[in-house]
Amino acid sequence: MKRIFIKSLARVEGHGGITVKIDGKKVKDVKVQIYEGPRLIEKLVVGKSPEDVLNIVPRICGICTLSHRYAALKGLEKALNIEVPLRTRLTRDLMLIGEIIQSHSLHIFFLSLPDFLGYSSAMDMVDNYGEEVKRGLAMKGFGYRLMEIISARIIHGENPILGGFGAHPSQKVLVEIKESAEKLVSDAEKIVELFASFDYPSYVEYDTTFMALNPPDGKYGFVSNSILISTDEERSVEEYKEVIQERVVPYSFAKRSRYNGEPFTVGAIARINLLGERLSGKAGDYYKKLYSKRWLRNPFFNNLAQAIEVLYCLETIPKLVDKIMGLEEPVVKKPFKDAGTGTGAVEAPRGTLYHYYSMKDGLITDCDIATPTAQNLDDIERCLRTAVGNLLSKGIEDDLELKLEMIARAYDPCISCSAHLVKVETSNNSD
Amino acid sequence: MTNVKKRLKGLIDSKSVVVIGLGNPDRADDGVGIEVAKKLKELAPDRIFLEQDGLEGVVLDILNRKDAETVLFIDAVDFGGRAGEIQIFSQATFSPCSISTHKVSLQLLSTLLKKEGKASYLLGIQPSTLDFDSKISDEVKKSLEKVVEIFTPFFNHSERG
């Protein structure tokens, strides 16, 4: 029995690893382990006020801080029957777009691109791909700037509050954001073309199910109250527990999810597969030009999906800014009740994020949060199993560890963040 | 301190320096780089930056600036010295840490700067405490004031000139 053990697929927020057991030419077992201990956030917020919750839950993630805040706001506002006005909703959407740009840019330029260009890190790319590195920095910096303008801080901004914003962004900074976004469109096109030029290996290909929120009015986007599934099913976000069927496994601290007993994928690749036909502008043109049925079977296309989403976001910002500036600045909506339940969901950069809250006497009595990476873990394992099986059947055993890491990175899980520092231990063990 | 002072003055006098203060002000001495930059910012707003100004954008702008030849990052650095001790590190000795989820590494930024013919240094101040929500320690505060004192005449002069 041979065992490939990627002990430390490390990331800043936690630690994970991959173990693959091989018997001859057969894959006996694949496990993706998340070693990071439970942080008990869902229990920590019980007994707290909604205002406290909004300061606690974004700390779950330093990358998707605003996605957590937005999903929490939606859940809490539903529970308290707070209906926020259009300008508040649009400004929150703009905030989320900033986070998607910065998160996708980090992944495609700095974590994934070195794999496809044959470098060990972005630092080694500087000599020959300095322009790409600069483009990544500009894009990521812009995403952060947008997040800062709306949330008041680059990370863990506290300006989005229950019922609205502490302060709405001024016309001046909105115009600045619009102009900056327009200038970056051509850079985004270049990165789409670069990722479209790569030859994505077929050994990872398998059939799976995709899931993403279904924005209203047939539009592309990241916010909705309904879940679209590639089986042509549509469910309300209130039914998410039934849809994603969470469970625990003994070898990992992260929960797992299945849909009708089978693994599924969320994230940019799911959104493009389910909603790509709704894209317009240059993002729509690239979708029509580049999309194929392979996107339904090959997770490496998640990189290209993220690049197209960056382009979509940059093209959407000017339209959103124009709409926001045409609306009156609203006052903060206050709750008229202190009890209820509500589920909020948004598309975080890595996929659908759910926040459920129950309240009584103005305090939280129950909370449940389901994150995208946890939803993807079963499908990552299935993909790794498929890939190793296909490679072994072809007699390819070189660089298996690197290939496995590339697959994990393609899904852009949080554990991919420091993947270039992975320590690989390969051993031949007799079980 | 004398050697550091000499080296610092050498750096400041010989090149067109841009200073970027780094760190987390919520964590005691880790905020020292930000505090130095805040105290100097008014003297030369186009030469002094804070991490919160957007590190990526600031460095990209510097790459295109002809009047910026040297970048001096200031941050708390645990190099095993005594609390408040100051050391200056050249680009080659920056820690080869990876890109994190939050920020790109200093080494990547300095590699980009080097490619464009610009030098970069890290002025590191040994922290005493990184406790959350605490004040900067007395030892580090003294070093902070010293660094500001060394820089102030230069940037005063620079603005007048």
Image (cartoon, rainbow, N blue to C red):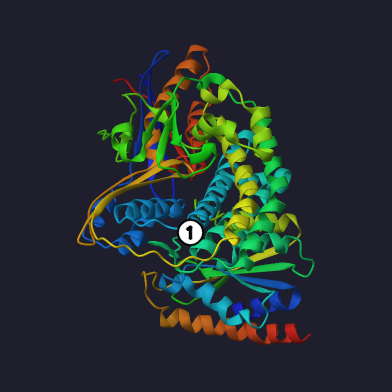
Q: Quick check: can you spot residue A139? A: no
In the depicted structure, whether residue A56 falls above or below residue B75:
above
Horizontal relation, residue A307 to residue A50: left or right: right
Q: How many marks?
A: 1
Camera-side residue of A336 and A72: A336
Q: Circle 1 is placed at which residue position? A: A88
In the depicted structure, whether residue A41 falls above or below residue B49:
above
In the depicted structure, whether residue B131 falls above or below residue B57:
below
On the image, which quarter does residue A346 sit in?
top left
Camera-side residue of A75 and A333: A333
How many residues crowd mark 1 within 10 Å: few (<14), some (14–19), many (20+)? many
Considering the numbered disc 1 on the image, is that residue within a helix, a strand or a loop? Answer: helix
Q: Quick check: can you spot residue A212? A: yes
* The C terminus of chain A sits in image quarter: top left
Q: Amino acid at mark 1?
A: Thr
Residue A410 rendering spot, x and y as whole percentages: 52, 34
Q: Residue placed at 76% from the left, 61% from the top?
A: B64
Camera-side residue of B87 and A206: A206
Instruction: Determine the chain carrying the residue at label 1.
Output: A
Q: Residue placed at 33% from the left, 32% from the top?
A: A243
Horizontal relation, residue A169 to residue A211: left or right: right
Residue A395 rendering spot, x and y as whole percentages: 52, 13
Residue A178 rendering spot, x and y as whole percentages: 65, 57
Horizontal relation, residue B15 to residue A219: left or right: right
* The N terminus of chain A sits in image quarter: top left
Q: Residue placed at 67% from the left, 77% from the top?
A: B45
Residue A417 rendering spot, x and y as whole percentages: 48, 45
In the depicted structure, whether residue A172 falls above or below residue B97:
below
Q: Residue placed at 30% from the left, 61% from the top?
A: A50
